[in-house]
Image (spheres, rainbow, N blue to C red):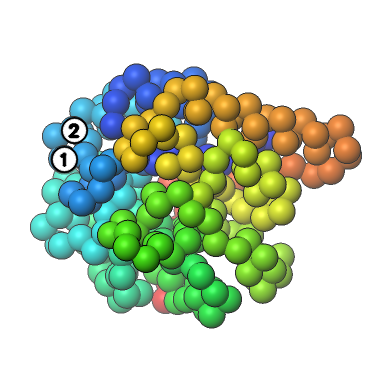
Amino acid sequence: MIRPHIKICGLKSEALIDAVLARGCTEIGLVHFEPSPRHCGIDDMLRLRTHVGGRAAVTVVTVDPSDETVARIASRVRPDTLQLHGHESAARVAEIAASSGLSIMKAISVSGVDDLEAIPRYRAVADRILLDAKRPKGSFLPGGNGVSFDWGLLDALGEDRDFVLSGGLNPDNIGEALRRVRPRGFDVSSGVETAPGVKDAGLVHRFFDAVDAALAAEQTDGGNAPPSMAETGRPDHLTQERRSA
């Protein structure tokens, strides 16, 4: 059975990149946000992006980036996707998309069903939507906090599963997320770390083992695997035409 699209975010070393790619990870996330323990500078991102080559898609995660930051990332790192994980308005997302020429993934923080009302606004200007938990009190990080939101809130979306799920995913709950949520993809960071910013190859293997076990269980039970880009026939997100406002 085909795995869902999986992005491992916050990688900082070639060794861990190789480890996640060996397990079939389809997207690598590099964080460019100085307060984060997962922060990579431009030169480090360029080195890691070069190391990935064409083995997986590469996304750079930013938080309310300036025009200068966007231009430097687009011209030097040349990622496949720019992830906006701050308070960017829909108009700002459209500006960044136009100036960078990059595929855009916009993160939306969720703690209540009302937060889902922002999805249509951002879908008009972004190629993908990522749903993450709101940061807990006292945290300065917009993501990577190791907390989940109530997935039951997503029932309000009906059959719409055209989003990437993030927030507190780990080897112990990814099976439930596969069965319960069935999103287009998953974004994992702190769930494969032993400390903030410290990825662990053993946890990476446990995570992918749990994914494979959940898919095998569904096959045995006669269930359906979570939807994938290949199964839905939808163009790959790197070539998908951006929706117009």
The quadrant in which residue 194 appears is: top left
Residue 197 vertical position relative to residue 51 in the rendered view, above or below? below
Q: Are the residues flagged by discs 1 and 2 in contact, CB closer than 8 Å?
A: yes
Callout 2 secondary element: helix
Assess disc 2: are there few (<14), some (14-19) or many (≥20) residues with their C-alpha within 10 Å of its C-alpha. some
User: Disc number at residue 91?
Assistant: none
Residue 65 vertical position relative to residue 218 in the rendered view, above or below? below
Q: Is residue 234 shown to the viewer in this render? A: no
Judge from the rendering whether residue 24 lies leftward or rightward of residue 65; answer left or right: right
Judge from the rendering whether residue 185 lies leftward or rightward of residue 36; answer left or right: right
| Spot occupied by residue 41 in the image (x, y as percentages of width and height) | 16, 40
- Identify residue type, mark 2: Asp
- Identify residue type, mark 1: Gly
Mark 1 vs mark 2, CA separation in Å: 5 Å
Question: Total marks drawn?
Answer: 2
| Spot occupied by residue 66 in the image (x, y as percentages of width and height) | 15, 62
Q: Residue at 63% across / 44% down in the picture? A: 173
Residue 9 vertical position relative to residue 25 in the rendered view, above or below? below
Q: Residue at 28% across / 59% down in the picture? A: 140
Depth order, front residue of 53/130: 130
| Spot occupied by residue 187 in the image (x, y as percentages of width and height) | 48, 46
Q: Residue at 14% across / 62% down in the picture? A: 67
Residue 58 vertical position relative to residue 97 in the rendered view, above or below? above
Callout 1 secondary element: loop
Identify the residue under disc 1. Answer: 41
Identify the residue under disc 2. Answer: 44
